[in-house]
Image (cartoon, rainbow, N blue to C red):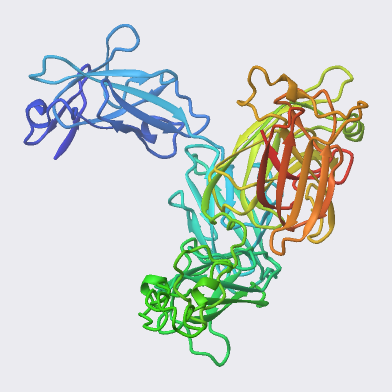
């Protein structure tokens, strides 16, 4: 039972059964049960204000939130205790004894109370901080999971948005965060947001739906309202594969997204094999089946995952697999994979009594000269073997039905791995071109830009975020832009490319923008060399199959290999009359057929410093999207040099300031 007793100079409170809170509670819990401002003692208030007490610190902290506009310079506190105590305010420089429900105090600054209880050697101190309730009901962020687009870009002052979501969406997460840390409530589509995970919103049947986000400020009066119109995108129509592989085996021909038929050979002892078939579109689904009319397959796992699907391979030497990719719109694309079992190794072949004596060319008959003419060479086949291509001294005859061995195609393409890709964008004092500055005119450059990471040549957004732009204007010179941005980790296959798009709004639907693509790697860095000005930042890359310019970047001597006495290799060979001779040769072949696509000199300049990065004299022409193998040879005047070879796909990844594209890079050799 609690009782609040009023005294003229001392507040005495008796709580039945408790005498000496120190022995019961220890020093952790103090004598104060509550501190409040009640309307009957404070005319500015219409409802009680109860303080929030933190027992841990010393002095103990009490936070009290009053309505906006409250006169905090003359508030009367009502204090409830759990034991007898004398109360005084000591924060004014002296000791002001308090009369409960009567003594006003200036709470525009923190007020410290001292409570002296019987039996305690030192007082209990409580520091009371009073602040006005926040009236800010705006949001600081608003996000929709799996959004393909969110327009316009979120701003606390913008209240209406249109969000496009994938065609297959049935439900999605809406997350919102208040600008004020004291925002009282966020309600999304009728459900209160209770955690950072947001609210699940149903989007089952309709192609368009509006949801509302209501907010209530800490003062419980100020409100705000945001609206999102959800729009279902058209179904994705891409049934192509991004990668197809059988780990431990080599596809023939090598995988290419426009090829539909493959063969491979697995070791003789294989009882099951794995197929990894990763679609280009994240909305596509992959299934493995037997061709019509053939026995069904035993398959476990998801072929589209990084681990792939396992296919049983028992009691047969050949299995045909149909890899079906179903696009989101239902479009099907079938790929066939003919899997054969390799011939058994020699040690595993069953003994053959007839041919086994072949290595010993009948030693008995040779010393019997009286025998007729044929006798000296009763087994002519072994002597006739050496001209055959097999170099083995004692080749056991391979059974005739052995399948044709897997052609030893040039080195197998690298294994497809799943990477966590992080991209760093660093723009340091990038000055706009005069063309862009003139087009911009007096237009303002927004203080925030946006970076979007996509899968190369797709609409699949991997990450999207804002960055702050620092704009410097120096007299009549074009503006200079600087910013930094680091992406979160995004999961990609090692044979994919990531497209990095930068856009900075300038008003009237126009942007400053730059786009470049990079092969997937754990850490990527991009430094925009320039910005273009237009209303459409998206880049349409050259169509696969079209002829494109191809270049390379290389050093005449790789850095780290430049030593003393190598100055002579800094110039390419010259003829007797001083004519320059080709010192850098390139040969390019189709990776599958081996047909030669280019062969010849690509640079013949002289006076080149070792270690300096160079380019071809003129870009060569190859086909966009084509898998190629190349051999690159550099020779110095002393006849020595170095060579390198590689396997790549021709993809254009850079735009040109003058318009169009910069040449595709065949390789970069530092």
The number of callouts visible is: 0
> Residue at position x 27%, y 24% from top?
57
* Position of residue 376 in the picture relative to residue 477 (left or right): left
Quarter of the image where one finds residue 577: top right
* Position of residue 208 in the picture relative to residue 337 (left or right): right
Measured along the vertical axis of the image, is residue 188 above or below residue 470?
below
Q: What x and y, as percent, mark residue 557?
A: 69, 29
Residue nearer the viewer, 447 or 133: 447
Q: What x and y, as percent, mark residue 94?
A: 30, 6
Measured along the vertical axis of the image, is residue 414 above or below residue 447?
below
Q: Quadrant of the N terminus?
A: top left
> Residue at position x 41%, y 40% from top?
47
Q: What x and y, as percent, mark residue 247?
A: 49, 63
* Position of residue 431 in the picture relative to residue 404 (left or right): right
Residue nearer the viewer, 241 or 78: 241
Residue nearer the viewer, 439 or 103: 439
Hey, which residue is sitting farthest bottom in the picture?
Answer: 293
Quarter of the image where one finds residue 564: top right
Residue nearer the viewer, 432 or 341: 341
Hey, which residue is sitting farthest top in the picture?
Answer: 93
Q: What x and y, as percent, mark residue 413?
A: 59, 56
Q: Quadrant of the C terminus?
A: top right
Measured along the vertical axis of the image, is residue 417 above or below residue 273?
above
Is there any visible trace of residue 33 in the rendered image?
A: yes
Quarter of the image where one finds residue 421: top right
> Residue at position x 71%, y 68% from top?
258
Is there any visible trace of residue 652 in the rendered image?
A: no
């Amino acid at each position: 039972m609690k009782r609040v007793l009023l005294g003229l100079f001392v507040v005495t409170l008796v709580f039945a059964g408790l005498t000496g809170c120190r022995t019961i509670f220890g020093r952790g819990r103090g004598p104060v049960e509550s501190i409040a401002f009640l309307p009957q003692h404070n005319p500015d208030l219409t409802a009680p204000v109860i303080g929030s007490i933190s027992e841990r610190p010393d002095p103990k902290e009490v936070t009290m939130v009053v309505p906006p506009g409250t006169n905090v310079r003359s508030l009367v506190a009502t204090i409830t205790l759990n034991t007898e105590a004398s109360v005084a305010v000591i924060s004014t420089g002296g000791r002001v004894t308090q009369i409960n429900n009567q003594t006003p105090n200036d709470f525009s600054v923190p007020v410290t109370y001292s409570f002296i209880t019987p039996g305690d050697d030192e007082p209990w101190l409580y520091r009371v901080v009073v602040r006005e309730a926040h009236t800010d009901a705006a949001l600081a962020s608003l996000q929709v999971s799996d959004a393909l687009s969110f327009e316009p870009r979120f701003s606390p002052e913008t209240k209406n948005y249109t969000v496009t979501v994938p065609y297959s969406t049935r439900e999605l997460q809406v997350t919102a965060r208040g600008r004020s840390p004291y925002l009282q409530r966020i309600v999304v589509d009728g459900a209160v947001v209770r955690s950072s995970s947001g609210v699940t919103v149903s989007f089952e049947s309709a192609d368009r739906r509006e949801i509302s986000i209501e907010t209530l400020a800490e003062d419980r009066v100020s409100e705000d309202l945001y609206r999102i119109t959800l729009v279902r995108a058209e179904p994705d129509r891409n049934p192509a594969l991004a990668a197809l592989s059988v780990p431990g085996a080599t596809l023939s021909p090598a995988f290419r997204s426009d090829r539909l038929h493959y063969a491979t050979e697995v070791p003789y002892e294989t009882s099951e094999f794995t197929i990894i078939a990763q679609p280009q579109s994240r909305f596509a689904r992959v299934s493995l089946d037997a061709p019509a009319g053939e026995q069904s397959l035993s398959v476990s796992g998801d072929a589209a995952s990084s681990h792939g699907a396992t296919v049983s391979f028992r009691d047969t030497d050949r299995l045909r697999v149909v890899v079906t990719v179903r696009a989101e719109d239902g479009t099907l694309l079938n790929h066939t994979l003919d899997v054969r079992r390799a011939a058994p190794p020699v040690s595993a072949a069953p003994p053959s009594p007839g041919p086994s004596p072949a290595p010993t060319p009948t030693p008995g008959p040779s010393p019997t000269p009286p025998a007729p003419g044929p006798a000296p060479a009763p087994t002519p086949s072994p002597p006739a073997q050496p001209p055959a291509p097999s170099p083995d001294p004692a080749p056991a005859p391979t059974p005739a039905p052995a399948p044709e061995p897997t052609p030893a195609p040039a080195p197998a393409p690298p294994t497809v791995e799943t990477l966590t890709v992080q991209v760093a964008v660093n723009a340091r004092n990038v000055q706009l071109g005069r063309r862009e500055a003139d087009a911009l005119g007096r237009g303002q450059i927004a203080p925030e830009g946006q970076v979007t990471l996509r899968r190369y040549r797709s609409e699949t957004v991997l990450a999207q975020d804002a960055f702050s732009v620092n704009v410097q204007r120096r007299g009549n010179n074009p503006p200079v832009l600087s910013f930094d941005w680091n992406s979160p980790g995004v999961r990609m296959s090692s044979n994919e490319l990531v497209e990095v798009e930068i856009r900075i709004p300038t008003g009237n639907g126009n942007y400053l923008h730059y786009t470049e693509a990079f092969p997937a790697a754990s850490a990527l860095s991009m430094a925009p060399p320039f910005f273009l000005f237009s209303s459409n930042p998206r880049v349409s890359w050259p169509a696969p199959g079209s002829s494109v310019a191809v270049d390379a970047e290389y050093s005449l001597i790789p850095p780290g290999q430049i030593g003393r006495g190598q100055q002579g290799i800094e110039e390419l060979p010259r003829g007797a009359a001083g004519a320059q001779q080709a010192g850098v040769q390139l040969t390019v072949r189709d990776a599958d057929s081996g047909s030669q696509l280019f062969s010849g000199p690509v640079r013949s300049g002289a006076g080149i410093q070792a270690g300096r990065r160079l380019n071809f004299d003129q870009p060569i022409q190859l086909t966009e999207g084509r898998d190629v193998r190349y051999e690159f040879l550099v020779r110095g005047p002393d006849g020595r040099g170095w060579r390198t070879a590689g396997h790549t796909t021709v993809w254009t990844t850079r735009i040109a300031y003058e318009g169009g594209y910069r040449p595709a890079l065949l390789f970069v050799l530092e």
